[in-house]
Amino acid sequence: MRRRVLLGAGVALLAAPARAQGLPAGFPSRPLTLVAPFTPGGPIDVLARVLGNGFQARGSAAATVDNRTGGGGTIGIDLVRRAAPDGTTMLVIPAGNLTISPTITRNLPYDVERDFAPVSMMATTSNVIVAAAGSPIRSVQDLVAAARARPDSISYGSSGVGSQLHLQMELLRSKAGIEILHVPYRGTTQALTDLLGGRIQLLSSNLPVILPGVREGRLQAVAVTTARRVAELPDVPTLMEAGFDIDVTSWYGLLVPRATPAPVVRAIAEATEAVLRDPATARSLAAQGLDIVAEPPEVFAARIRRETALWAEVIRARGITAE
């Protein structure tokens, strides 16, 4: 479903900076389109709207968010790939489409290095392994003990085969020497329904997705995947604390077509950092489990290359293939 939304006053209340500064020299002066290739309401959509509002508050002509969904993000990605390389069409995208899909997906319609210029990493969030409230699995130790006592009796859901949420569980499975069953889903709603209904025992998901359920008492967090505990769930241990050398963070970045001039890329990166580091914006995103990490283009590009190599190794070692 295609959905284009002109950013307006209601959304601007979420993220417009209190004292906006002007845009840097070289920033596109024409109306902007921020493509969010996933459905409205998730982290990608939120970040695209935050960024669009911030650009408008600083003087851009207009900013439109285009939720161009379908194909696991590839439809929206391809739209930006084919856009004019003038900085007016930008892509807000999660890590997996940049660092995992190129290895696991056949006939991918884009090549990250050939087709896109990295602008900035925008934000990170922790991933969390959760069980339904009342589940006997309350810790990683419980999970490992149950899986060893009854191999393949524990199933977990994720957002799909080859997703980062899937691969991090495969890392745990390998390091713990256990057998657990993967159940891929196309969306979080059905996965949560099946978790609460007892059809799966665990769910691997992003912090913003599961935080409401934990706070409401419907879910219990088993572990976070980052090296350090997260402020929103201070009592939940990390996988490292449980004895497994796993540090996985979900992140979201901004790209433009590859031929976009370097000064334009740099100007967009500077404007992006200014928007995201506005105190009110940072607080608003933090409340939703998103932490600001505004990496410049060259640092962001190096991260993409590094993590692509990491996940390619995991995919080959576990023999994972796309559906």
Image: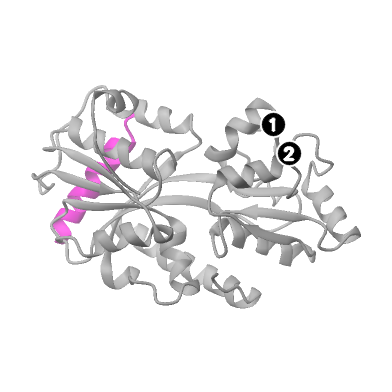
Q: Is residue 293 left or right of residue 153?
A: left
**Total residue callouts:** 2
For label 1, the SS is loop
Residue under label 2: 132
Q: Is residue 100 left or right of residue 30?
A: right
Residue under label 1: 218
Amino acid type at circle 2 is Ala
Residue sitting at 59 percent across and 77 percent down? 316
Q: Is residue 296 visible?
A: yes
Q: Nearer the viewer, residue 14 or 298?
A: 14
- Seen in the picture, residue 190 relative to 153 is either above or below; the reply is above
Assess disc 1: are there few (<14), some (14-19) or many (≥20) residues with their C-alpha within 10 Å of its C-alpha: some
Q: CA distance from mark 2 to mark 1?
A: 6 Å
Q: Earlier in the sequence, mark 2 or mark 1?
A: 2
Q: Main secondary structure of the magenta part?
A: helix
| Callouts 2 and 1 close, C-beta under 8 Å | yes
- Seen in the picture, residue 181 relative to 123 is either above or below; the reply is below
Answer whether residue 276 is magenta in the image.
yes
Q: What is the number of the mark on residue 290? A: none
Give coordinates of residue 156: x percent, y percent. Answer: 70, 54
Q: Quadrant of residue 302?
A: bottom left
Give coordinates of residue 273: x percent, y percent. Answer: 29, 42
Amino acid type at circle 1 is Arg
Q: Which residues are magenta?
A: 261-278
Give coordinates of residue 287: x percent, y percent. Answer: 48, 29
Residue sitting at 16 percent across and 51 percent down? 88
Q: Nearer the viewer, residue 236 or 210?
A: 210
Answer whether residue 197 is magenta in the image.
no
Q: Nearer the viewer, residue 89 or 194?
A: 194
Give coordinates of residue 116: x percent, y percent. Answer: 27, 64
For label 2, the SS is strand
Assess disc 2: are there few (<14), some (14-19) or many (≥20) residues with their C-alpha within 10 Å of its C-alpha: many
